[in-house]
Image (cartoon, rainbow, N blue to C red):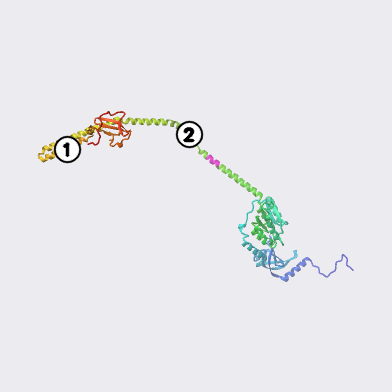
Amino acid sequence: MKPTMDEPRQTNTPEFSVSDIAGAIRRTLEGAFGRVRVRGEITELKRYPSGHIYLSLKDENAKLAGVIWRGSVSRIGLQPENGVEVIATGKLTTYADRSSYQLQIDRLEYAGAGALLARIEAVRLKLLEEGLFAPERKRALPMLPRVIGVVSSEKGAVIQDIRTTIARRFPRSVILWPVPVQGEGAAEKIAAAIDGFAALAQDDPLRPDVLIVARGGGSLEDLMAFNDEAVVRAAAACTIPLISAVGHETDTTLIDFAADRRAPTPTAAAEMAIPARADLLAQLAQMQARLLSATQRGLNERRLTLAQVERRLPDLPALLRETRQRLDDRGERLRLALPNLLAARRATLDRLTARLPHPRERLAAQRAGLALAGTRLNAVLAHTITTQKGRAGRVLARLSDVPVRAQLREAAQRLQGVAARLESVSYERVLTRGFALVSDAAGHAVTSAAQVQAGAHLSLRFADGQRQVVAQNGDASPSPKKRISPGKPKPRQDSLL
């Protein structure tokens, strides 16, 4: 007889609740393993605000979830990081809410570099030696790009964050090259997208001015596409300034070293790529205010300087009137200066003329002097001769000796001869013999014909008077004022003796 619908089905299988099963499994697992040491590579490391750290340990074939409670973090022994191979010591237990098992870790020890980190480090050292990470290769980002290119997944919040940030800061054209950001073939497609943007012509309106390569956070395995050598080389060879925004702030990939700028998040990359319109407007307003202030300050300084200079300047109309008056005065004085100068020079000349003797008076004085000198010379000669004669007579009278008298007579004869010769050399005696004394206008005796120039005024003194003549062609002719009366020709003056 079959049981009805209302009757319970009879079975020998025991019935357990979910909690009973979870508890039994937990007791069995903890009893079988107890405290264990597990070697694996840390991945999917997450720190929660509560202080707990959740991670996974993996090897080539499996992955084990793990947790480090807040109370054990300070005693764990090292700072856990993704990609580090460690030996974790703890208790294996279950997490009934998710029907999973996990390792409660209370101690970590380094087991050596992880496989992924070792691979990444090898690529990094290789590219570093080639100079792909050199600082001099970095290029500056444009101030205000026209087009912004993005290499990222078309799904997810990354592209939306970038578009929202750009629209909020300064709306620009955004061109997305959709690529897978993880999994098989992701690295090749990312490198092809970067090369595709760089291959666009310079005048192509679709060519971006700045390029953003972005994805959200994830485990080390999820970010491995951006550690690929092909992607890093494409980023280094890109002719467009490139911003790397892969993962969160704590994540570091090799593309970060080859990019021109690294952003901690995709949103930060958008903020780097485009300035905020409000900031630009505020900066422009500030610069305008500073410029206006500087201009106004410069104008005020110039006005002050001009006012100071203006105060130091004289009254130009008054200065012009004084200059005109001074010019009129100088003109009047200049007009009278030449006649006054001529009158003064004429008065001085008249005074000097009155003080100068007439040439005739000077000649008369010279003649009188010469006559007086001749008279005195004749008187001296006559007195000398008389004295010598008297002295000689007295000497002869005192001397009675014949030889002495003979000597005296000889001496007297010599004396008479000397007296006769002395008297004969007197210029007046010479003039009586037909000779003339020639002198120039200054009264100096002329002794050579070479001293006489044509037209020179000469004075000829004779025994009975004086005449003025003018020399012509080397011959003396009578002066037009006083001509010499013709007479018998003068004898040739060969000698004064």
Q: Residues within 10 Å of mark 1 (few under 14, many from 20)?
A: some
- Label 1 and label 2: CA atoms lie apart by 92 Å
Residue 152 located left or right of residue 13 = left
x, y percent for residue 163: 70, 53
Residue denoted by label 1: 415
Which contiguous range is marked in magenta? 302-308
Foreground pick, 4 / 156: 156
Residue 294 appearing in the image: yes
Q: Nearer the viewer, mark 1 or mark 2?
A: 1
Identify the mark at residue 323; answer none if there is no mark.
2
Foreground pick, 485 / 39: 485
Is-magenta flag for residue 201? no
Q: Quick one: which residue is furthest to the right in this view?
A: 1
x, y percent for residue 291: 60, 45
Which of marks 2 and 1 precedes in the sequence? Answer: 2
Foreground pick, 413 / 371: 413
- Note whether 462 is above or below 119 in the view shown: above
x, y percent for residue 384: 18, 35
Q: Quick one: which residue is furthest to the bottom in this view?
A: 32
Foreground pick, 123 / 420: 420
Figure quadrant of the C terminus: top left
Identify the mark at residue 108; answer none if there is no mark.
none
Instruction: Name the amino acid, label 2.
Output: Thr
**SS label for mark 2:** helix
Residue 444 located left or right of residue 121 = left
Residue 216 lies in what quarter of the image?
A: bottom right
**SS label for mark 1:** helix
- Note whether 231 is above or below 310 in the view shown: below
